[in-house]
Amino acid sequence: MSTSLRADLFDPASLAALGRIEIIARWIVDGFLAGLHRSPRKGFSVEFAEYRPYQPGDDLRYIDWKIAARSDRWVVRQYEEETNLRASIVLDVSRSMDWTGAADRLTKLAYSEQLTAALALLLLRQRDAVGLVRFDDRIRTAIPPRARTGQWRRVIGGLSEPGSGRASSAPDALQQAARLINRRGLIVLISDLLMDMADVERALRTLRAAGHDITALHIMDPAERDLPASGEALFVDPESALEVPASVADVRAAYQNTVQEVIGEWRGMFGSLGAGYEVVLSDAPFGVPLRRAFAARQQLP
């Protein structure tokens, strides 16, 4: 793609049709960073910081062999780039996410997967450690945050693992993300939030008490927000299979009011806990949610 064209501003469905998820993610991030008018590595140091115990999977090049020979203790030289932010992306892959209100739009899940790939790459280019937790009625994927080479490929691989169960178990996924981070970090929840608010709030209170920063990207299809169809319709809950027939004209106003009330309740709940919240429509260019998530990252120490 030409460098004069910013993929982060393209229509997401048209963009996704041009190639594989990892290729599109690179285009999106390149465009996004070009729009920032700054180097993605500006302000980050790679100087030696400290030692830490060796862990299986660590790069052998960073083992201090002199210390190992002297004290029979294996330690790894840790650099500043390893001590930046630890982030975990928590992605809802429940059945309600696998839906679109129009044939020329991505499903909420396809949009969120592409967004997850781009956000992971963006954070890794900032030399942050990034992990991924995918969930439906149970945790499907749990990749601990890492900043080393190959982590983005692990995230991309995780996005193709099974999912699409009926229910959404966000509290368990959020707790799992916190356990994987091991210290204070950033948790980005990407979900349509078709779940019980009280359960999510209890989990968030625990995470905030532990010092974690949280941002929620509330993914909605435009048809979910506006209910644009006309005539008779059958409304189906994809997770419970509940069916309700109704005339769209009769319910549209009440539906739109209810949606706005629910959005207000979610925004109020997240705001009361000092967490970020943003509604993201599935036809919005990927630069829109990336800016929100990146802004949350830049506000952290």
Image (cartoon, helix red, strand yellow):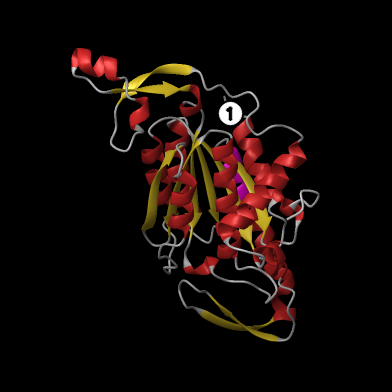
Give the prevailing secondary structure in the magenta stretch: helix
The residue drawn where x is 64% and y is 68% is: 106
The residue where tag 1 is placed is 300
Residue sitting nearer the eye, 243 or 285: 285
Reply yes or no: does residue 149 show up in magenta: no
Q: Is residue 299 left or right of residue 124?
A: right
Q: Which residues are magenta?
A: 266-271
Say few, some or many: other residues with alpha carbon within 10 Å of mark 1 (under 14 / 14 to 19 / 20 or more). few
Q: Which residue ends up furthest to the left in the rendered image?
A: 72
Q: Is residue 110 left or right of residue 180?
A: right
- Residue 99: percent from left, percent from top: 58, 71
Reply yes or no: does residue 268 show up in magenta: yes
Q: Is residue 151 left or right of residue 121?
A: left
The residue drawn where x is 63% and y is 50% is: 26
Q: Amino acid at mark 1?
A: Leu
Residue sitting nearer the eye, 210 or 98: 98
> For residue 202, what is the image quadrant?
top left
Q: Is residue 73 visible?
A: yes
